[in-house]
Image (cartoon, rainbow, N blue to C red):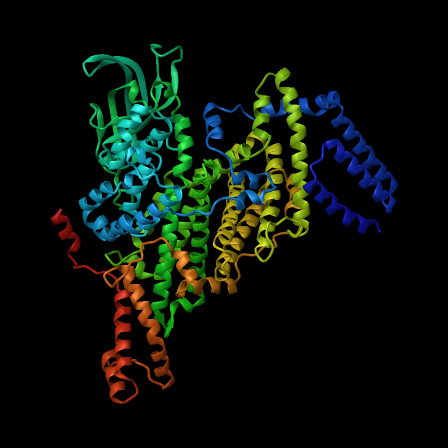
Amino acid sequence: MFWIILMLLLPALAMLLARVHLSLFAWGGVLAVAILILISAGMPVWPGVLLLLLDVAGVAVFHMYAWRIRLISRPLFRYIRQAIPPISETERTALEAGSIWWEAELMRGEPDWQKLRCVAEPSLTKKEQAFIDGPVEQLCGMLNDWEIHHRLRDLPEPVWKFLKEHRFFGMIIPESYGGLAFSAYAHSRVLQKIASRSSAAAVTVMVPNSLGPAELLLAYGTEAQKDYYLPRLARGEEIPCFALTTPEAGSDAGGMTDYGIVCEQEFDGKPTLGLRLNWSKRYITLGPVATVLGLAFKVYDPDHLLGEQDALGITCALIPVNTPGVVIGRRHDPLNIAFMNGPNEGHDVFIPLDWVIGGQKMIGQGWRMLIERLSVGRGISLPSLSVASGKLAAESCGLYTRVRKQFHTPIGRFEGVQEALARIGGMTYLMDATARLTTSALDAGERPAIVTAMAKRYLTEGMRQVINDAMDVHGGRGVCMGPANYLGRTYQSIPVAITVEGANILTRSFMIFGQGSVRCHPYLLSEMEAVALPEAEGLPVFDELLMQHLAYTLANIGRSFAYSISLGWLAPAPVSGRAARYYRQIARCSAGLGAMADMTLLVLGGALKRKEFLSGRFADVLAHLYMCSAVLKRYEDEGQVEADWPLVRWSCNYCLYQVQQAMDGILHNFPVRPVAWLMRLWVLPWGRWMRPPSDCLTRKVAEILLEDSPTHDRLVNGIYPGEGENDIIGRLRIARDLVVQAEPVEMMLREKGERWQGPESYDAWLARLVADGVLEESQQRLLLAAREAMLKAIAVDDFPADEWQREVNRK
């Protein structure tokens, strides 16, 4: 009887902890009642009495302020002060930048599904749709990727002119300054279509609309700066770039050695207070063709011309590239991708203070400016390129594996190939859903730095996976470069996307959980601020926060145990039907994440900064919960289409399996083993029971890529369609249609025992079958057309033996 009551009581207490927000004193009373019930059910008396006394003692300590301060709050206050180093100004700026959003709901262990479901479905205005259907479509038709990369190493001059005339560089600039004023979603869709045609063109359009002068001017510029620069940037009269990275300092902006000295010098014929700059930058996109340079540097005022401080901090300025002392124009060669990128330097470059973005008052505010605005562009630019790569891979692989046959069977019907096709299809759906949700947040006015960091890191990694799979599927067809290769350049460009706008290793290992654990926690940042105060002032504040924090942690532990012991069935779901189980599993994992993160921070403290393995796994948990949420949101937004369900299932199963593996990795490698054993009880009490997508589901997703359907069209919607036999994707589509039409005729011939095996030519064999009355002339024409189209579609490029020497001579 005792054990039955115990098994019923534990989940009941856990659910009470999860659903009812009580004070610690009230929880002491609940626990006392539970112990009395167990004693009455047959629990040995002395252990029961001991537990009851411990409960009463704990309640007394926590309820009596003086005892609590002496025994709990003051020791913890002093421990945290020693264990966690003070927050630096750089860290504080990063923590305070932008906003928190859905990621905070997931981190806190009790996601409010209504908050997610209330996010508006992304949509395009008539003006935005017209731009995509008009100028963007025209631009894509002008782009010859082989010519851009192999012949010109640049965009053709007519393309540059077209970009400027149609204000592609002004998508984020308001109409009042001559820009297009597009939404984040429209911005993303424009980049997706261009990227499906040429990565170099996409990067060229991406950079002026991401972190750069226009973004910084809109947020911080003076009215005079906006009035002068924004119309010129929108019209393409000024080509901007932004220079941040130095040889000594990449991700560590605080280690930047570029500097400006406050001084007075003659400028335009009169004495002017300004800055004398010296810098060395590299990896600056659009730098070789830029006319105006955005620059980040540190400002020093040794003569105290602006105040009493010597070091004034990181600052951003706009500098015309023809300013004396600026050295710019040389190019890097980033993996043979032909977008403009190069170094620049400045030697004793004098600029007046009004060239500082925002004017003199913004000196020293550059780090905050960069961190706040990076959270916008980072959530649009590279995620859009990643989604475009996924859609291009899904479309091209679906067509190619339907056309290419071995053993009289399309290679897309072989299970080994279907495994790769399913990853391509599922990852593309997942990436697109994530990009849609992220741009919806940006359009709603959110600036979620953690969300955009996750979108950049995990979508570019998704791009790496799908393009690698696409190359495997195509084999030699993808390896041989030439005008007919539609995958090779994207494959080459992957490391560029992985590296820029926050290198993926850094983003996963440091930023996502490192900032998210503090920023998204309801109490932690306030507690850290309290312990930084003198003890007499900070201890009362810390004590109050600590009591709320403990109640919050206990609730998450109870919630995690209740949801996990029930395999998620006790977790809430905002919908009924088959999608409900995924909402419940996200809620279960979210509660586990919240409880594990709290325990990890408590046990490891400041040492967590150096536990990058653990931090990276926590980032994996949070990111895959976010992406799984995005999939469910998309499924709802699009009307829960029955035919889309295999893609939804694949994406959710994949994400939740990754969450489980990351959680298990945290527990398996947690340095304090008793704590790890305890956490496993409430996070994975039944072990690793979730499974990746099954073989049956893999086959269903692969079939979506192979056949024409509305689901297939939704999956690849937004890339350049590529019509006609003069287009490399158009040829595949023509071949697929003819091959499908010819298959009944081919099957009829096989049933009659007719097989072409040579040495008779294919044409002669068909002519003989017509003469023998086995085949009709119309069927002969269809088979010939299908074979010809198939051979054109799968053909690879070749060149004269002296092609490369002739290229050198031409140059």
Give me the residue at 51% from left, 47% from top: 624
- Percent across and percent down for residue 550 are 67, 32
Is residue 155 positioned above or below 750 on the image?
above
- Residue nearer the viewer, 40 or 281: 40
- Percent across and percent down for residue 146 are 23, 52
Q: In the figure, is residue 762 to the left or right of 423?
A: left
Q: In the figure, is residue 574 to the left or right of 333?
A: right
Number of numbered discs overlaid on the protein picture: 0
- Percent across and percent down for residue 590 are 59, 44
- Looking at the image, the residue that sits furthest to the bottom is 772
Is any part of residue 154 visible from this angle? no
- Percent across and percent down for residue 465 are 41, 52
Residue 778, image quadrant? bottom left
Residue 599, image quadrant? top right
Is residue 407 positioned above or below 674 on the image?
below
- Residue nearer the viewer, 507 or 651: 651
- Residue nearer the viewer, 186 or 259: 186
Q: In the figure, is residue 122 to the left or right of 778?
A: right
Is residue 14 positioned above or below 530 on the image?
below
Is residue 561 positioned above or below 644 on the image?
above
Q: In the figure, is residue 231 to the left or right of 399?
A: left
Residue 501, image quadrant? top left
Is any part of residue 591 visible from this angle? yes
- Looking at the image, the residue that sits furthest to the left is 809
